[in-house]
Image (spheres, rainbow, N blue to C red):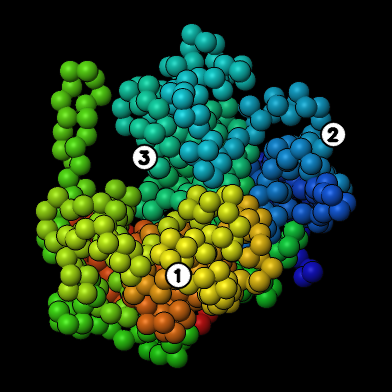
Amino acid sequence: MTEIADNKTPDGPVDAPVDAPVESPADAPADAQADAAAEDVVLRVENLAVDFRTENGPARAVSNANLTVRRGQTVAIVGESGSGKTTLAMAVLGLLASNGSVAEGHIWFKDEDLGHVSAQRMAQLRGTELGLVPQDPMTNLDPIMRIGQQIDEGLIDNGLRSRRDARARTVELLDEVGLPDAARRAGQYPHEFSGGMRQRALIAMGLAGRPALLVADEPTSALDVTVQRGILDQLAGLTQELGTAVLLITHDLGLAAERADIVVVMYHGEIVEQGPARQVLTAPKHDYTKRLMAAAPSLASRRIEIARERGLEDVLDDALLAPGEEAAAGTVAESDALVQVKDVSKVFTIRGSGLLSRSKDFTAVDGVSLDIPRGSTVAVVGESGSGKSTLARMILDIEKPTRGTITFDGGLVGAGGHKDQIAYRRRVQPVFQDPYSSLDPLYSVFRAIEEPLRAHDYGDAAARRARVEELAEQVALSKGQLQRFPAELSGGQRQRVAIARALALSPELVVCDEAVSALDVVVQAQILQLLAGLQDELGLTYLFITHDLAVVRQIADRVLVMQQGRVVEEGTVDTVFDSPATDYTRTLLDAIPGKDLELAL
């Protein structure tokens, strides 16, 4: 393991805090400076080891971890899935799974060793001094309780407000995190909130007790870049105002560079590098940190931008995953277009909330036209609610257009009978965002990949087995993994299964709907490389739906930008990125984390 120069022991030298005594550092006694700095430390982790009990004995998830978090400071822990970053954070909060425990070391919160406090004291600290903003709001909010009730409950249970005063404080908290019309919103259920609004509600809960330390575990990983920026700006403003220290868990190095003071890099349960954020990410020392940086789409996008500015074509060839030949501007010739979407709209009828309320129409897609050339990758980007997923569902013939036409290989989509629809399903396949929910948990990997072959009467059992094994090899799954179930696989492995299943019937078009947004950067890079390789090998055509423009720059030939159901900009990736024509596109590009980093090429 690499030696970490910035790991301080409790007695080692530390920087003077911002709010040190008025006397100058030169005149202040050394012990006074040390005392002031010690008071500034909110969290100090010393030689921490975390074990989990398994059938085969204890498994070490975190080993020899040391880090310090000071008042008002943001420390980001980065690393791929399984690196131990969330386990370390849960150990700090005393929220390890029932089979997990702190095996060695200490977790000092101010002057208390959290490894030796009672369960009652730990619960008290979590309600007041320690806050948490978890990753997935839908699994951390009770779907049958109104948002306001859930915040009220925390305030009352932790003794922060009386039952009579709790609702007024809840409304104040929701207003603080930027929810408009907070009093009305407090009376709504989680399903009535957008993803960004639900995340804001969780931030309100996390900051309700005005904690000294807030643990933010991937708080914006599932959100689009503009919503992510708004929420992180709000969080930064509130924590700065309160003097709260933040322990930020993330796999996005661009985000860490932009938001953190200190970056801590974890790999296989160990801290392999740490230091000032910009220093670590512009001049990484450890090979694993360099690997993370090479994989991060936001940083890859920044390297492409720098390379173009400097005319370094060899760097561009290494950074781009797409074929790299720009499609000609304008409409693709009809003979070259596999899919043509012409003036398509989709209108949904939304029922009123009351018995006497009238239904109203909502236009999700409004007059969209696009061409997808054979063998190319066309990306559709935009914020949540822009209509891009609805457009994908219409191309997949899951939703029917209200107006307009969609043609595939010259034939009208959805115009034929059941047999035509079955034939279309063979030629067009989806890969969805969450590979866990799109795979049957009771099916083995083999059965999941085999299922479309069974449904379409592909050969006998031996032919299907041979085809499944061929597909597994194409997506780098071993034969042993074919007997496993989805719960036994990592997120990246599950997405490989989903891709193999989509390729089972040798489709011509694959629709990737946020296919890498739920994966860490290393796995993202692997899946993007896999998709690019399969495209070259099999001549596939991709429609790539995403909110992440950094991913688009790596993999796409052309890009459409959608806003409120309309296409506001279209062109080659280079044109859109280098010379955006609309303020909205510029806003999306400006929101890519780490866009101002000076990276080595």
Q: Which residue is mark 1?
A: 458
Where residue 225 sits: x, y (%)? Answer: 39, 55
The residue carrying pointer 2 sits among few (fewer than 14), some (14 to 19) or many (20 or more) residues within 10 Å by Cα, namely few
Amino acid of disc 2: His
Q: Is residue 104 left or right of residue 450?
A: right
User: Mark 1 vs mark 3: which is more N-terminal?
Assistant: 3
Q: Secondary structure at mark 1?
A: loop
Question: Which residue is found at the position 77% from the left and 54% from the top?
Answer: 62
Label 1 neighbourhood size at 10 Å, few (<14), some (14-19), many (20+)? Answer: some
Give me the C-alpha separation between circle 2 and circle 1. 61 Å
Q: Which residue is mark 2?
A: 116
The amino acid type of the residue labelled 3 equals Ser
| Residue that appears at 44% across and 84% down | 537
> In the image, which disc is placed on residue 194?
3
Answer left or right for 597 relative to 193: right
Residue 313 sits in which quadrant? bottom left
Q: Secondary structure at mark 3?
A: loop
Q: 372 or 564, which is in the foreground?
A: 372
